[in-house]
Image (spheres, coloured by chain):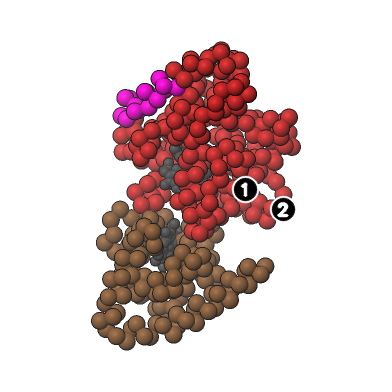
Amino acid sequence: MFNSNMKKLLTALAISSAVIAAPVTSMAAEKGASTVEEGKKLAFSRSKGNCLACHMTGDGAMPGNIGPALIAMKLRYPDKQKLYDKVWGKPETQTVPNSMMPPFGQHGILTDEEISKIVDYIYTL
Amino acid sequence: MKKTLLIALSLGVSVGATSAMANTVDPETDRQQLVDFFKAKSPKIDIADYKNGAYIYSADKLAQWEAAEEFPPYLDAIDAGEAAWNKDKAVFEKCFGSDVSKIRVKYPYFDEGTQQVVTLEGAINKCRTDNGLEAYKWKKGTLAQVSAYLAYNARGQKIDVKIDSEGAKKAFNAGRELYLMPRGQLNLSCAKCHTYNAGRLARSNILSPNVGHTTHFPVFRAKWQALGTLHRRYDGCHKNMRATPFKAQSEEYRNLEFYEAYISNGLEINGPGYRE
């Protein structure tokens, strides 16, 4: 019980900090380009996001097909925050029963900053 | 379509019941539901073929695998297993009898005396230590070779695990629970890969169905370039889930094996098998 409250608190904290962080990255254009590059590296790295294990992602080689292809993200997630929440694993985004999608933020697999960068990258797909 | 949905739902219901840890399921009903689930998922695949693991899902991979099985890389290991058996033959025959074709099929079983699942590998080492011989190392090496020798001699016989006591039912349910519950940093469960997503690709690996998981062990993996036991594989999958693995032959893994073997009842033993 305590544990789940703790998680909610952590979720709330992470989300508010992401909201604050988001405009900062999008203001500086050059920094934006490099976070997209970094995000791509993080997304492809087996020890970090490893998104390719399950998703077709950009030009990544040999993707799995457990999850849907990550394409047209801007179209499907006009609200970028919702995309961040999905990757972070905010409980209300975990709606698919027995989903393989790991809750990257909630389980501490990636830091909030790493998730932000990955989201910047997949938002370009 | 409607049928698929119904079956998927009924599996979901029984899964839900276990997650609440409210009650235990009847093993035979559970096995039948799982078989129906896989039949609905892949109507063209004969359940008898599930002994071939992930290869049932790809004609190309199946053809490559069948070619590899013609001159399999595990033949030397079977010979080594036979040599190890013969070296301590007197002791082994005292424990297992003299017909090496009749041993593999008896395992795993539930021992009413100790209220524990007994696996083939566990019995081999117990036989050794009870008779003053040193236990083999778990997971690979001579133990896997002797196990492979016994599996090879039992090829064609069918898995026939019996559950006819409360204790055995409990062990099955404990194994099933370990199979279903998410564990580890990635929030994965065995079921997410080997039941719900069986046949899909994790990167370039096709995910095998859990029905049939135990038929062909120990396995010679190209990646290991040697034989490994079922518990070695459990260890590897738990690590991939970023979960802490249990020890080979721990009660947890013996129960997991008992569950996976029971749901594979009726399938042919075809070990040792070659895997990528």
Crowding near pointer 1: few (<14 within 10 Å), some, many (20+)? Answer: many
Above or below, B10 relative to B96: below
Where residue A120 sits in the image (x, y, percent)? 34, 74
Q: In the displayed structure, does residue A38 sit left or right of residue B57?
A: left
Whether marks 1 and 2 lie on the same chain: yes
Instruction: State the residue position of label 2.
Output: B22
The amino acid beneath tag 2 is Ala
The residue indicated by pointer 1 is B177
Element assignment for label 2? loop
Instruction: Say which colour chain B has.
Output: red
Image coordinates of residue B8 in percent, x first then y, are: 56, 50
Tag 1 near tag 2, CB within 8 Å: no
> What is the letter of the brown chain?
A
Magenta span main SS: helix
- Residue range in magenta is B67-81
Q: CA distance from mark 1 to mark 2?
A: 12 Å
Displayed quadrant of residue A111: bottom left
